[in-house]
Image (spheres, grey):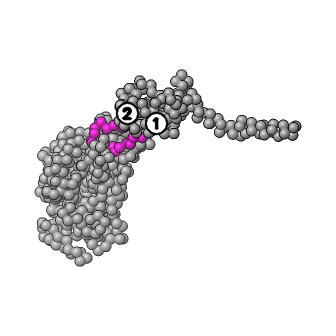
Amino acid sequence: MLAAYLLITLALGWRLVDIQVLSAPHYREKARKQTERDLELPAERGKVYDRTGEPLAISLPTATIVANPKQIAEAGDAVDVSELAATLSRMLPEPAHEIEARLRKDRGFVYLARQEPHELGVRVAELDLPGIQVLDEPKRAYPAGPLAAQIVGFAGTDNVGLSGLERQYDSLLAGLPGQMIAQRAPQGLEISSAPRLGEPPVAGTDLVLTLDSEVQATTERLLAQAVDRYKAKGASAVVLDVDTNEILAMASLPSYEPKQIGSASAYARRNRVVTDAYEPGSVSKAVTAAAALEEGVITPRTAIKIGSSYTVAGKTFTDSHSVERGTLADIIRDSSNIGSIKLAERLGPEKLHEYLVKFGYGHATALAFPGETDGLLADANDWSGTRLPTIAIGHGVATSLLQVAQVYATVARGGVYRDPVLVRGTVGSDGTLEPAAAGATRRVVSERTARVLSRMMVDVVEDGTGTKAAVPGYRVAGKTGTAQKPREGRAGYEPGAYIGSFVGYAPADRPEVVVAVSVDEAKRAYYGGSSAAPLFSDVMRFTLGHRRVPPSDPEALDAAAPDV
């Protein structure tokens, strides 16, 4: 008996040591879970504003209705689950049978409805239903509707950024959730009088964009009109401030309404100004011309033989209209393919490739926008016999519309490339604006080259292929472009599928605004000079007026570039 007693005592002692010492953390956590409930307090997501303080994305308080099915089951006959579900279905968007199915699950937490109007949450809370609780949860809202929707992007039900800036700056906008520990009775009921411990949530940081809502809205309206007028698949535009390279507007139509994003096509959801690469066509001839001037392979007064056709590596290139002999000004004004090809031959593949890269081709911009394309630019060592002449006239290379706009912004800025800027700054909890870093700069061509090229591109608008891009009272420098769209997944081009574009800046004597527009697959007037140029004129005219830019000095540009 003594031995049995000692064995039993030893076993009990060991068990006590195991419970109170070795397994104490396990039982302590189990007890905590029975008497406490960890609640995550969602942080208010940061707001997104335009440059003038107009809200583009905000968070609104909503009610989320949840249930504790285990607590309801433990109540037994005291709670009629079917009647409880019927009561809730009269207020919630879910039918009674679905609510009842959730209430009968063997779980301690289920959602019955999420992010419903705050007033509905108040009505549910007033009923004081057993096992039912109302939580406050912020919901993302876009007060400007479809305005800049492709740029701002979209945050899902859990307030996680899914596209656009909402995704790119999610960690900044999201903030830090708080935590609260609520005491519970054995039946799962919350003890409201018990002290609540935890950490409060930290609201997300606000973003202030460089976009101007008025310029953005007008640009979107003009794009929609152009799509309708030319029976086009779509149209895109970007507007830049020359000095700071801030993006004042960036839009693609068709777009989408944030509330109906689920039904929008991938084409409508994309910010195609930066995500879609296309062959720019003749607007890229500005790079060839700038490189030729900078490298001294041609002077403004040099006349070269052009003609109407030219054969390179067995491929014949033609011009619809060109002079037999002409200067660089003639080549740019008439958008001469042959003239541009002969300039490229004087430069050689390595030099032309070098300037394409300097102007920003072949790699994404510093925006790092989600889904932004690098474009397509093969290494000069891989160029075939026809690649040099093809690239010289804007084919065989692919860019985004923003990359092309950067070329013209560089020329307008006197030959200095500056990274584009979309976020002007951030606003923290103290309410002060922390300005974003200015875009990095690098010199691409000399100021003289940029000045001479500007004067030549004025002739494009005044007496060349881009006359419909003119803006009354202002001298405009720019270039037209028309390119056939390549077939997807196979060689060749889609018959009848073109992208027309126009890129330029004004006033040409003291550039302040760059506008780049493209019209995708226009059924009417698909040439850049016929569809994109008038659209450019409308966007530029509004932007100059909105920013109160004085009219051009008709003699200033001629005096600045006397060699032309």
What residue is rendered at 29% in x and 64% in y?
488
User: Is residue 142 in the magenta section?
Assistant: yes
Q: Position of residue 97 (x, y in %)?
A: 40, 38
Assess disc 2: are there few (<14), some (14-19) or many (≥20) residues with their C-alpha within 10 Å of its C-alpha. some
Residue 129 seen by the camera: yes
Depth check: 129 or 241 in front?
129
Residue 557 seen by the camera: no
What residue is rendered at 24% in x and 51% in y?
236
Depth check: 289 or 369 in front?
369
Work out whether 509 lies above or below 70: below
Q: Is 77 positioned to the left or the right of 374 in the image?
A: right
Q: Position of residue 203 (x, y in %)?
A: 44, 34
Instruction: State the separation of the CA atoms marked 1 and 2.
Output: 12 Å
Which amino acid, by three-letter code, is at mark 2? Ser
Work out whether 122 lies above or below 163: above
Q: Which residue is mark 2?
A: 89
What residue is rendered at 35% in x and 36% in y?
93
User: Are the residues flagged by discs 1 and 2 in contact, CB closer than 8 Å?
Assistant: no
Which image quadrant is residue 127 in? top left
Q: Is 323 positioned to the left or the right of 118 in the image?
A: left
Q: Residue furthest right?
A: 2
Helix, strand or loop at mark 1: helix
Which image quadrant is residue 43 in? top left
Which amino acid, by three-letter code, is at mark 1? Leu
Q: Which residue is mark 1?
A: 103
Depth check: 499 or 389 in front?
499
Helix, strand or loop at mark 2: helix
| Quadrant of the rendering where the N terminus is positioned | top right
Q: Residue furthest bottom?
A: 314
